[in-house]
Amino acid sequence: MAFAAVSEKYSGKMREMEVGAGDKKVTVGGQASMPFCSFDGDLGNKPIIAMEVYDVVNPEWPAAVVDPFKDVINDPVAWAKKNVEEYGAKMICLQLVGTDPNGENRDANYAADLTKKVAEAISVPLMVWGSGNVEGDGEVLAKICEVCAGMNLLIGPAVEENYKKIAATALGYGHCVVSQSPIDVNMAKQMNILISNLGLSLEKVIMEPSTGALGYGVEYTYSVMERISLAALSQNDEKMQCPIISDLGKECWKSREVKLTDKEEPSFGPDIEKRGVLWEAMTAIDMMLSGTNLLIMRNPHAVKLTEEIIDELM
């Protein structure tokens, strides 16, 4: 008996979201099938990787993520340019950890000035990620929206406690927003509803349902993101049809498996860098297979490996 492939046709489709302006513009999302299932429908736009740049680097970072940037690691503008010009980054994610009020407490004017310098120095779109302090991010990201008006940045994360200020200023100055929620399908939908009620089109929203690294909750993240994708496609739920983003670099490189030497844990083997690269790349692949359209990553070797796999799967 000849093999007959079973095809699943969906009534829904994920929205496309454009980030950047002019020649810097890229598009994410747009798929009408589950990830890489081309036999079921249109795969949409190829998943994109945004390479991280930090304004302040944690001194505990392992050598595997310091060495590729050791000549520029204290200069975010030069770091961003190196990611683009040497490592071929398709997007940059500026992580503003220095604005955390519980850390270095750098102000909104500093953040806006740095963001504009980075945006003007690179030939690809820019994403700006806050420190994670709810109140501080509201002030910082709002100022960035104002100073970088018209650049169509992707800013976030907007959470339940600060989405009003972030989404409103993004709407006023023409930017896209990351809608972040705890790992829960209903809460992800609720955040999209709240943001859209402010008047920001869902075509300017991307979901971050919280990301877990390999060995640290990745299976829970995977299942929730897969359910979001199925709700968007099978149930044609328009509130769930925003693209998905995964902020995975920071999650992977704080895990114990990428830091311990073979003396501390003989079963891990001696090659710490290879272990870390594979840890990040495997997490990225898991995220893509569950529906992620945009990945935030750190190590350039992990990025290259992941992009090779994307090309094969597409």
Image (cartoon, rainbow, N blue to C red):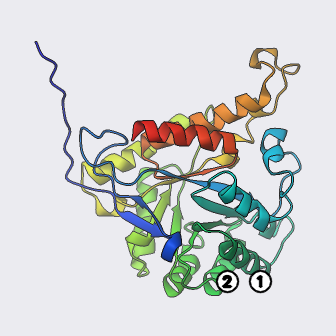
- Which quadrant is the C terminus positioned in? top left
User: Which of the 4 quarters of the picture holds residue 137?
Assistant: bottom right
Where's residue 54, x and y in %? Answer: 76, 60
x 79%, y 79%: residue: 110
Where's residue 271, x and y in %? Answer: 78, 24
The type of residue carrying mark 2 is Lys
The answer to whether 309 appears left or right of 235 in the picture is: right
Front in this rendered view, residue 45 or 87 = 87
Find residue 289 and name its label.
Answer: none
Q: Look at mark 2 in the image and give the residue it sits on.
A: 143
Viewer can see residue 252? yes
The answer to whether 212 appears left or right of 174 in the picture is: right
Mark 1 and mark 2 in contact? Answer it, CB < 8 Å: yes
Viewer can see residue 223? no
Where's residue 10, x and y in %? Answer: 21, 48
The answer to whether 170 appears left or right of 194 in the picture is: right
Q: Look at mark 1 in the image and give the residue it sits on.
A: 109
Mark 1, Cα crowd under 10 Å, few <14 / some 14-19 / many 20+, is some
Where's residue 183, x and y in %? Answer: 52, 49
User: Which of the 4 quarters of the picture holds residue 280?
Assistant: top right
In the picture as drawn, the residue positioned furthest to the left comes out as: 1
Total residue callouts: 2
x 81%, y 33%: residue: 259
Question: Looking at the picture, does residue 6 appear above or below residue 126?
Answer: above
The type of residue carrying mark 1 is Asn
The answer to whether 149 appears left or right of 78 in the picture is: left
Question: Label 1 to label 2, Cα distance in Å?
Answer: 7 Å
x 86%, y 54%: residue: 71
